[in-house]
Image (tube, coloured by chain):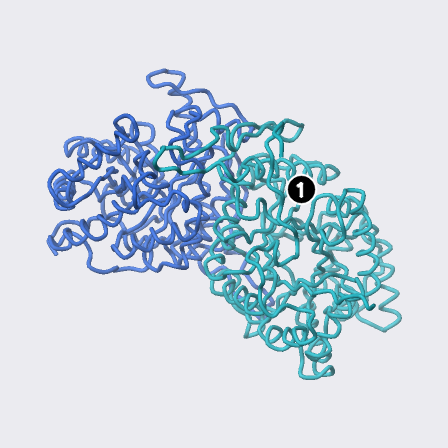
Amino acid sequence: MTDRPPLHLAVALDGAGWHPAAWREPLARPGDLLTAGYWAGLVTEAEAGLLDFVTFEDSLSLQPMRRLEPDGATDQVRGRLDAVLIAARVAPLTRHIGLVPTVVVTHTEPFHISKAIATLDFVSGGRAGVRVRVSSRPDEAAHFGRRAVAVAEPRDAASLDTVTGLFGEAADYVEVIRRLWDSWEDDAEIRDVATGRFVDRGKLHYIDFEGRWFSVRGPSITPRPPQGQPPVAALAHSAVPYQLVARSADLGFVTPHDAGHAAQIVAEIRALEADAGRAGAGGTGWPGGPLEPRPGAAVLADLVVFLDEGAGVAAARRDRLDERWGRAYRSDAEIFAGTPGQLADLLLDWQAAGLGGYRLRPAALPHDLTQITRGLVPELQRRDAFRRGYEGSTLRQLLRLGRPASRYAA
Amino acid sequence: MTKPLKQVHLAAHFPGVNNTTVWSDPRSGSHIDFSSFAHLAQTAERAKMDFLFLAEGLRLREQNGLIYDLDVVGRPDTFTVLAALAAVTSHLGLAGTINSTFNEPYEVARQFASLDHLSGGRAAWNVVTSWDAFTGENFRRGGFLAQDQRYERARTFLATASELFDSWRGDEIVADSDSGVFLADPLAGSFAHHDAHFDISGQFNVPRSPQGRPVIFQAGDSGDGREFAAECADAICSRHGTLGEGQAFYADVKGRLARHGRTPDQLLILPAATFILGDTDSDAAQEARAVRRQQVSGQTAIKLAEQLWNRDLSGYDPDGPLPEIDPDPGENTIARGRASVRMHRDPVAVARQWRERAAAGNLSMREVIIEVTGRQSFIGSAATIAESINALVQADASDGFILVPHITPGGLDDFAGQVVPLLQERGVYRTEYTGRTLRDHLGLAPHPAAQRAGEAS
């Protein structure tokens, strides 16, 4: 192995793939998208490719293309399953790969999500993570009826307040779920027959969080997860979400369009981390207390990938899918169309920008996933740039994160 | 012509957060590791049971202002563990208790519809309501619900969730790759519900699941609870497992169905039942007494008495007599977050009954509490237990039982191996699953496909 830091590779799973017309491809299984077998197949393939983790997309509305409102479209995948439950359903069928569902933090209860992710960690033997996302959509707010969400337009000052508020709530939400994960010390369960005590209540802690959007007393009803602190991830495109990554997350998914851009984003996040008193590198865990140094977030770049062997084949497939879709597919992430070898070149080139790795978005499932696991991964292994076997049994271990003690432990 | 034999329904409950579990027994396993849940689920499935049932936790229980530490503490999230159990079972129903207070219908409906998809149609929902501010301290809205509104809340939450489940007919996804039409109806999932509790509208994002909606369980015993069950539930997890009480409850609840346009076979009565299985009846009786003493230690007896007396009794000796004083009147504040404290409607009268029992048997506080806080439903050899279960079902005291082992995860193994075959031999219990969904196992007709309002059938 070279002295390059390890490359982390994840795959973002959503429907039939990230291209809106992917469901029409010959290998697609658009009638199976709501079955356990479909998701189990994808995740076991990803695990065969030795990937660090998979993410599962989710939202509190039908998958829309328009940013803020339903689009009434009938030509894309519509309908989805709860991501935490997909992750739990495939957990017993896998052994090494991390499982990172998306949860929406704007209308849901942090107490419920905390125990759900802790339980995912138990049923997977320590492989759970969670990607938090906010909801700025009025239609999602109307599904709950508890609050109105002001429509956020880009470059509008009032909207910046709205967005800042949503991410402020997200930061509080992450703080609550982390405190709840710590609210049971690791050895709280004592089963002490002599004194008749199942638990040592001195090792159970109220979290007493009081915030603008919610207050939570605690403790959790679920014991401390196997990983202690399942990794928290967030997707970020700009300053406000970079702040969430810097202050609250273990993983940041970002969307650079070239190596220089990647370097800028990493620098911005590191600067925000420094402001927050968070060390940029080193450290072995999350020792607790807001002023103690902790390792910087691992910053992964998102890329949509069309992968095929042979010159021009992937680009041609992309064109064909765009034609079926009726227009060019555009993404918040950079779109790559080429061979696995060419992608390997790009990944290793951009890595020097300070990226911890990549979250690849397969344009079409299962095709682009198998190109990753059977094309890209072997190529990276040949270059000594990727693992040849799983070196740890928890997601924190794969991400080279230590296991922190509870912040409440004496 | 003799009446045809009723089929016995059996299910399994993974207990924990109460004093049923004898956690001090060396055979007692983890209440949080997935392997424990998988073990019990797979035992139940091998025994062709209808479902596995889980309760729910929203706040650690407290007594005298301190976290209660004598019973099992700590449990997994219900939805998450049921989804994982779907991966290690193929036919067993997966029933979870999910409250209708500290949740919103859109999210709960998505989770049940997803669980139903991910299990091939095996999801069930035990609808409960919490209202206390103590529990509310963990949630956004705090304690917002008045106690006397709890059935209204449950009813409207369930009605709203049902509208969400029915918002997809099941034929909207055509996924025609040639024409490019994925969704035949752009309005799929449309819904609107506006009342005092929920003011919501939009499109539900989970298409119709295999059962259409989860099987609905209900567990309340009051008149309101029974009426709610008669109106909305497919099964009741009841508390009445003896012949007389069971028959009375059964007749009462089934008698309410016609008013709601339903027939008796559309609502199953399934009491919870504990058991002690022995080689002989007298072995089992001896074991039963020993288990009760393990479940109710001296310390536990004091705690249970405090829940009735609504005051600190730590100065009392559990091997001495019951307190002479009457229970403290008013709202029960000694124990928080525990369902059972709501059961004592007339604490003074109950205390008097306990004293009478103690006097009649010359019993100490601990001994009388062991007697009055429940004995095992079935005690005996396999043949005795099988006979008792069958007799109760044939006599319409129940339609079956939800078995609650006091040792987890292995406490159902012997029952599955010894009692179930006897029921199978009598022809009153399935030898194979004949269907794939939980509705199939419970003998319930498929839920009718919804029609969009205004359309012809």
* Residue drawn where x is 59% and y is 66% of the image: B48
Which is more toward the observer, B21 or B349?
B21
* Residue drawn where x is 20% and y is 48% of the image: A7
Give coordinates of residue A22: x percent, y percent.
31, 38
Which is more toward the observer, B173 or B379?
B173
- The answer to which quarter of the image holds residue B195 is top right
The residue indicated by pointer 1 is B132
Q: Quadrant of the N terminus of chain B?
A: bottom right
Q: Secondary structure at mark 1?
A: loop
Q: Chain of mark 1?
A: B
Which amino acid type is marked by label 1? Asp
Any part of residue B70 in sight: no
* Residue drawn where x is 38% and y is 50% of the image: A39
Q: Left or right of B285: which side holds A188?
A: left
Q: Quadrant of the C terminus of chain B?
A: top right
- The answer to which quarter of the image holds residue B340 is bottom right
Give coordinates of residue A281: x percent, y percent.
22, 44
Q: Left or right of B229: which side holds A16?
A: left
Dot 1 surroundings within 10 Å: few (below 14), some, or many (20 or more)?
Answer: some
Measured along the vertical axis of the image, is residue B382 above or below residue A251? Answer: below
| Colour chain B appears in | cyan
Measured along the vertical axis of the image, is residue B182 above or below residue B313? Answer: above
Chain identity for the colour blue used in the image: A
Give coordinates of residue B215: x percent, y percent.
62, 50
- The answer to which quarter of the image holds residue A256 is top left
